[in-house]
Image (cartoon, rainbow, N blue to C red):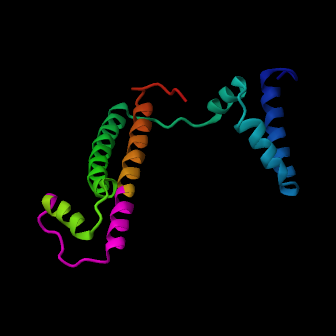
């Protein structure tokens, strides 16, 4: 093995990593410096090195496609439910009876027991936002699955 060969460079890199880990035990600022210098860098060579040492997960393209398809269907259902639930708050129904009438047209089994007017509007609004946020998260998961299946390019 030549001192300047590729094996020597790899051995030196391993020793440098071990030295950094020893220094980190006594100086916590090294972790922040390392993150900014290596993980958050825009240097293409360092980014390629990080990709080289990261383990690639074996991805099944067909399974990733069906996961993405399921996530898209779930996202569309959640978005529709969220918009239907958000409509009374946006339209500005003022009384709980108007909201209950709106939902009784959609669902025939609405409870006759009513909480106070402001509380029912607030609960309905928070529920609608939760549904919409869930749909956006499902869309994000679907995009990740499509990237794993190499069906869309990673533009970020």
Q: Is residue 44 left or right of residue 28?
A: left
The quadrant the C terminus occupies is top right
Place of residue 50 in the rendered image (x, y in percent of width and height, measured from the top left):
66, 33
Q: How many marks?
A: 0
Place of residue 97 in the rendered image (x, y in percent of width and height, measured from the top left):
21, 69
Q: Is residue 1 above or below residue 83?
A: above
The quadrant the N terminus occupies is top right
Which of 3 and 77 lies nearest the eye of the viewer? 77
Q: Is residue 103 left or right of residue 12?
A: left
Residue 108 is a magenta residue: yes
Which of 116 and 22 lies nearest the eye of the viewer? 116
Which residues, given as a range, are shown in magenta?
106-128
At horizontal 32% and vertical 32% (from top left) the residue drawn is 62
Place of residue 20 in the rendered image (x, y in percent of width and height, measured from the top left):
83, 45
Q: Is residue 96 above or below residue 156?
A: below
At horizontal 50% and vertical 28% (from top left) the residue drawn is 154
At horizontal 63% and vertical 29% (from top left) the residue drawn is 52
Place of residue 33 in the rendered image (x, y in percent of width and height, measured from the top left):
81, 43
Q: Is residue 145 left or right of residue 32?
A: left
* Residue 49, quarter of the rendered image: top right
Residue 30 is a magenta residue: no
* Residue 129, quarter of the rendered image: bottom left
At horizontal 72% and vertical 28% (from top left) the residue drawn is 46
Q: Is residue 97 above or below residue 18?
A: below
Which of 12 and 102 lies nearest the eye of the viewer? 102
């Amino acid at each position: 093995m030549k001192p300047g060969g590729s094996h020597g460079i790899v051995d030196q890199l391993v020793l440098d990593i071990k030295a950094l880990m020893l220094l980190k035990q006594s100086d916590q600022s090294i972790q922040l410096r390392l993150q900014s210098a290596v993980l958050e860098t825009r240097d293409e060579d360092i980014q390629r090195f990080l990709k080289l040492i990261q383990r690639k997960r074996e991805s099944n393209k067909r399974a990733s496609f069906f996961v993405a398809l399921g996530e898209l269907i779930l996202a569309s259902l959640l978005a529709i439910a969220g918009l239907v639930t958000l409509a009374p708050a946006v339209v500005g129904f003022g009384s709980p009876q108007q909201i209950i009438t709106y939902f009784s047209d959609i669902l025939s089994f609405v409870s006759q027991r009513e909480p106070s007017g402001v509380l029912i509007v607030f609960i309905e609004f928070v529920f609608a936002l939760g549904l919409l946020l869930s749909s956006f998260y499902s869309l994000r998961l679907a995009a990740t699955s499509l990237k794993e299946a190499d069906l869309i390019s990673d533009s970020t």
